[in-house]
Amino acid sequence: ANQKGTLERVLKQYANYDVLVIDEVGYLPFSRDGASLLFQLINMRYEKKSTLITTNIPLSQWSEFLQDKKLTNALLDRLVHHSKVISITGKSYRMKDYSEKKTKTPKSK
């Protein structure tokens, strides 16, 4: 989607969804262009559409993967305004089965 017309079309497409879910934000670092695109998308959706974001990175550390403090502040300003932040603490649900299997001892015969 690097060509200008294509990129604008794709941004508009994502901006127009009633609900957009962006999963695992910050799992990989963003390039400057990628961070800028995320900001543009969030800015287009701001106060118009619902956006859900999942991440395991505290908001205070977002500038580390977005690599731009000013952009991060502007992005978070739009994201947290009118939002509900739900923090979930504890052990990973996905690791639950693994942890239970690891702690169980084999049955003797």
Image (cartoon, grey):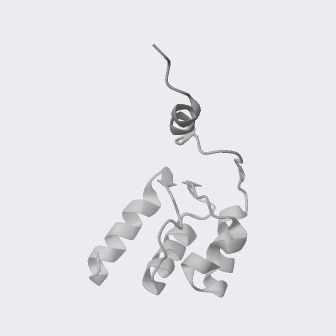
Residue 77 in view? no
Which residue does the image show at 55% across and 68% down from the upper left? Answer: 42
Q: Is residue 29 above or below residue 55?
A: below
- Give the quadrant of residue 64: bottom right
- Give the quadrant of residue 53: bottom right
Q: Position of residue 11 (x, y in %)?
A: 40, 69
Which residue does the image show at 48% across and 86% down from the upper left? Answer: 32
Q: Is residue 21 above or below residue 105?
A: below
Q: Position of residue 25 (x, y in %)?
A: 53, 63
Most foreground residue, 71 or 105? 105
**Outermost residue, top side:** 109
Q: Quadrant of the C terminus?
A: top left
Q: Is residue 89 above or below residue 104?
A: below
- Give the quadrant of residue 78: bottom right
Q: Quadrant of the N terminus?
A: bottom left
Q: Position of residue 20 (x, y in %)?
A: 49, 53
Which residue does the image show at 54% across and 42% down from the upper left? Answer: 95
Most foreground residue, 33 or 106? 106
Q: Position of residue 65 (x, y in %)?
A: 56, 76
Most foreground residue, 2 or 44? 2
Residue 11 in view? yes
**Outermost residue, front side:** 109
